Amino acid sequence: MELRRLWTHRKKEKILLARLRIIDKALQRTHSEFLVELDKQLRSELDTVLDQEESLWRQKARTKWILEGDRNTAFYHASTITKRRANKIETLKREDGSWSTDQEELREMAIQFYTKLFSSSGDPKYNYEIRGKFQKIEEHEKESLTREVTNEKIKEAIFGIGPLKALGIDGIHALFYQKNWSLVGNSVSMMIR
């Protein structure tokens, strides 16, 4: 099942990338609003496919990590190499819409982007005044925010979490707490309170 999903994601990714390359070439020759909108739509679809594939890999890695832990394994080394590759920027879009793969140009583009981002533009539209913009909290609402949390509310929150969601750096899924609430419920509630 997982391999079929992965194969489907990769196939969609290849098709979308091929279509984007064709549109990019066409846009270099002539500007068309239709092609610009199609480019945006395809990039959005590609982002979705890549997010789904990343989620699948993350789930597979978490399962493997739970089984093998922090041991010095081939999996551990492969995960590290994969992370390094995923964190590498290989292309950036120039202001004219074309793509650059030259490492020196990528470095310069990144420096320019962050220099512009973190420099003062003096533009008043970026002057955020937030005082008085929030709704006032009524007295009864204030009381509910400061009220002590009950064991029932804690249990309700734990059981409201998706069973396979991790609860922090321990990597233990909510399912563990839900299935073993009779054993760990008091300890968890005491820790939270």
Image: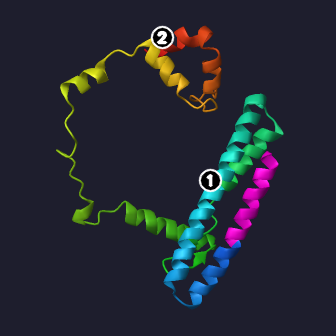
Circle 1 packing at 10 Å, graded few (<14), some (14-19), many (20+), is few
Report the residue at 80% width, 51% height from top: 4
Percent across and percent down for residue 183 are: 62, 9
Q: Is residue 102 left or right of residue 74?
A: left
Question: In the rendered view of the protein, which quadrant contains the N terminus?
Answer: top right
Report the residue at 62% width, 29% height from top: 163
Q: Residue furthest left?
A: 132
Tell me: residue 147, above or below residue 89. Answer: above
Percent across and percent down for residue 40 are: 53, 71
The secondary structure type at the circle numbered 2 is: helix
The secondary structure type at the circle numbered 1 is: helix
Judged by its main secondary structure, the magenta piece is: helix
Amino acid under disc 2? Met
Q: Which residues are magenta?
A: 1-17
Does 6 lie within the magenta span? Answer: yes
Query: Which of the 4 image quadrants contains residue 116?
Result: bottom left
State the CA–CA distance, disc 1 to disc 2. Answer: 37 Å
Upstream in sequence: badge 1 or badge 2: 1
Does 74 lie within the magenta span? Answer: no
Nearer to me, 168 or 102: 168
Q: Residue furthest bottom?
A: 29
Report the residue at 72% width, 50% height from top: 82
Question: In the rendered view of the protein, which quadrant contains the C terminus?
Answer: top left
Task: Report the residue marked by disc 2.
Answer: 190
Percent across and percent down for residue 159 are: 55, 23
Amino acid under disc 1? Asp
Instruction: Identify the image's colour scheme: rainbow, by chain, secondary structure or one colour.
Output: rainbow
Q: Is residue 153 left or right of residue 184?
A: left
Circle 2 packing at 10 Å, graded few (<14), some (14-19), many (20+), is few
Report the residue at 25% width, 63% height from top: 125
Task: Report the residue marked by disc 1.
Answer: 51
